[in-house]
Image (cartoon, rainbow, N blue to C red):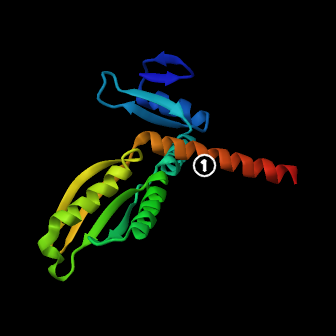
């Protein structure tokens, strides 16, 4: 079966190939397993170019999520805690996952509950921005917790980014 400009005709492969050659187009088999096989006359180079163009556009639209790391200590001061919280907030708003790492040194290993409290306190303070992906786990002398940004935080950040880009392009146009 040959599909040509919306019309459907049943003809031999040779006749269909001759028609395609007369028009300087290609005969492309759409469904080989159908009875009879379905073929279409089209410009294969153009179709392939369109497919590659769609693939490139989809790659541009993909968002790559990175995991950023924030290091903490079981005996962290309040000011340092706030600084690390700001860094984690910045990463989460940018759409990245955050791994909170807490390293135990020396005799601090005996007080793992203090380290767990520090991690959970940070997670609790970032609860409006993030979900806990992985609860605190001890690996050797490090305890880690994984946070991922909430979808509404990511959407808000993306819309703000688009608005900034629009403002920047408008400002350049006015100059």
Q: Specify whether 123 is left or right of 83.
A: left
Q: Position of residue 101 (x, y in %)?
A: 29, 67
Q: Position of residue 49 (x, y in %)?
A: 55, 46
- Image: 45 above or below 99: above
Residue under label 1, please give it.
161
Count every numbered label the image shows and give the total: 1
Residue ID at (60%, 45%) = 160
Residue ID at (43%, 68%) = 79
Q: Quadrant of the N terminus?
A: top left
Other-residue count near label 1 (Cα within 10 Å), few / some / many at <14 / 14–19 / ≥20: few
- Image: 104 above or below 128: below
> In the image shown, does 59 or 156 lie closer to the viewer?
156
Q: Specify whether 57 is left or right of 31.
A: right
Q: Residue extending furthest bottom?
A: 106
Residue 145 visible here:
no
> In the image shown, does 88 or 125 lie closer to the viewer?
125
Quarter location, residue 103? bottom left
Q: Specify whether 175 is left or right of 124.
A: right
Q: Position of residue 3 (x, y in %)?
A: 48, 23
Residue 37 visible here:
yes
Q: Residue extending furthest left?
A: 110
Residue ID at (41%, 47%) = 129
- Image: 113 above or below 47: below
> In the image shown, does 127 or 35 lie closer to the viewer?
127
Residue ID at (32%, 53%) = 123
- Image: 156 above or below 111: above
Q: Position of residue 130 (x, y in %)?
A: 37, 48
Q: Secondary structure at mark 1?
A: helix
Q: Residue extending furthest front?
A: 78
Q: Specify whether 100 is left or right of 1.
A: left
Q: Quadrant of the C terminus?
A: bottom right
């Amino acid at each position: 079966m040959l599909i040509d400009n919306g019309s459907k005709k049943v003809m031999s492969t040779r006749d269909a190939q001759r028609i395609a050659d007369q028009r300087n187009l290609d005969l492309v088999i759409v469904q080989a397993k159908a009875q009879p096989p379905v073929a279409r006359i089209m410009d294969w180079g153009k179709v392939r170019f369109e497919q590659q163009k769609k693939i490139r556009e989809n790659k541009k639209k993909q968002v790559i999520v990175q995991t950023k790391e924030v290091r903490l200590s079981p005996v962290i001061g309040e000011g340092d805690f706030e600084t690390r919280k700001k860094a984690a907030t910045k990463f989460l708003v940018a759409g990245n996952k955050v791994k909170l790492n807490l390293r135990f040194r020396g005799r601090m290993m005996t007080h793992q509950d203090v380290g767990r409290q520090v991690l959970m306190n940070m997670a609790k303070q970032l609860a409006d921005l993030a979900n806990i992906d992985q609860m605190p786990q001890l690996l050797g002398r490090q305890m880690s917790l994984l946070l991922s940004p909430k979808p509404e935080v990511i959407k808000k950040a993306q819309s703000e980014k688009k608005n900034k880009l629009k403002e920047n392009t408008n400002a350049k146009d006015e100059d």
